Amino acid sequence: MLCTYNAQGFWSLGVPFLELLFCMNSPIDCSKVRFAISAVREAAQLAQQVQKKLVTAAISKDDKSPVTVADFAAQAIVSKRLLDTFPQMGFVGEESSEALCTPESKESLEQITHFVRQLEPTATPDQVCAWIDRGAGEPTDEFWTLDPVDGTKGFLRGDQYAVALAFIRDGKVRVGALGCPELGAGIKPEKGGAGTIVVARCESGCFASLLTDEDAAWTKLSVSLESNIASARMLRSVEKAHTDTGGIGELVTALGVTADPVAMDSQAKYAVLAAGGGEINLRLLSPSRLDYREKIWDQAAGSICVEEAGGRVSDLDGKPLDFSHGRTLATNRGVLATNRILHDAMLAGLAEIGA
């Protein structure tokens, strides 16, 4: 099977057809798409193995955010794959091995090394730390950025999380892949699914397939065509520290939105939006962190997935996300992703409430 039209109204593409499509009329060569799919699959399945073994105790970083064995192991393996495949290319990852360099973290480092050895049998603790720390650099003209377990708190709770990998050139995301182990084939905001991988490339579309089946068909994703703001389904962060829940409530009232916002962890929200399972993904600034600027790895992969599915992504002021200012979106304030149709209405609503 190469290409069929399924009952949900999506194009289902066999693997050869997907590669053929991605290789046509795009400035990005296919090797980067193939790499993103393979690396995200490996890292996501590694995170699943960590979760199944109940190795979910978290280490606290300097900013008090949690990081787990899965975060470190996933970053180590993606870094090693990048070193083998694109050795001259930059890599910007969320984690560093600093938290593993204390006597108290010796057991955690041993656990991380154990899981990495499932894919790299001869890996040593020193090598694992070195692979992790390859992600400590600053962005270059073209580089990869990784959030090894986006939504660590969701991972710890058994809710949504994602492995998010993106290739960036000249400040713009060119390839993005999301591995979402808790998303089912329908890509709805529900946990407990079989796992989904979503990949997008500039000017080539956005596609999804089963996370654990390399031979499964790929489905072309398209955003919702909902044009009534009152009927919009809004996705937001679970953690109150990551957004402004009061502001979202005020916005919902101002716009007359009837459905309650859906709380989801991680960039899995972007996957749901790209698949038409929601119309709005909103990241308002928390009142306690009004000067916060998003990390590039928290938005890169998901944003291109929505855009290539026909949606629009901007900051709260309507400006495109600019990935050319280091490790943060320094010139952007918050994030708004929509099905494009409702974007202007959302920006007007945000201005009305002073967000």
Image (spheres, grey):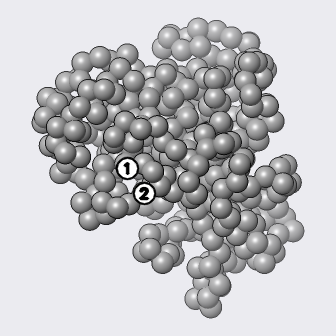
Residue at point 73%, 65% (across, down): 134
Q: Is residue 94 above or below residue 106?
A: above
Label 2: state its secondary structure.
Answer: loop
| Label disc, if present, on residue 293 of the rendered structure | 2
Q: Is residue 320 above or below residue 69?
A: above
Closer to the chain start, of discs 2 and 1, is 2
Residue at point 58%, 79% (across, down): 99
Residue at point 76%, 38% (across, down): 32
Figure quadrant of residue 273: top left
Q: Is residue 193 left or right of residue 76?
A: left
At label 1, the amino acid type is Arg
Whether residue 325 is visible to the viewer of this picture, yes or no, is yes
Whether residue 44 is visible to the viewer of this picture, yes or no, is no
Mark 2 neighbour density, 10 Å: few (under 14) some (14–19) many (20 or more)? some
Mark 1 neighbour density, 10 Å: few (under 14) some (14–19) many (20 or more)? many
> Residue 286, percent across and down?
28, 58
> Residue 330, percent across and down?
47, 55
Q: Nearer the viewer, residue 121 or 97?
A: 97
> Residue 181, percent across and down?
55, 45
Residue at point 42%, 57% (across, down): 293
Task: Report if the CB atoms under discs 2 and 1 are less than 8 Å apart.
Answer: yes
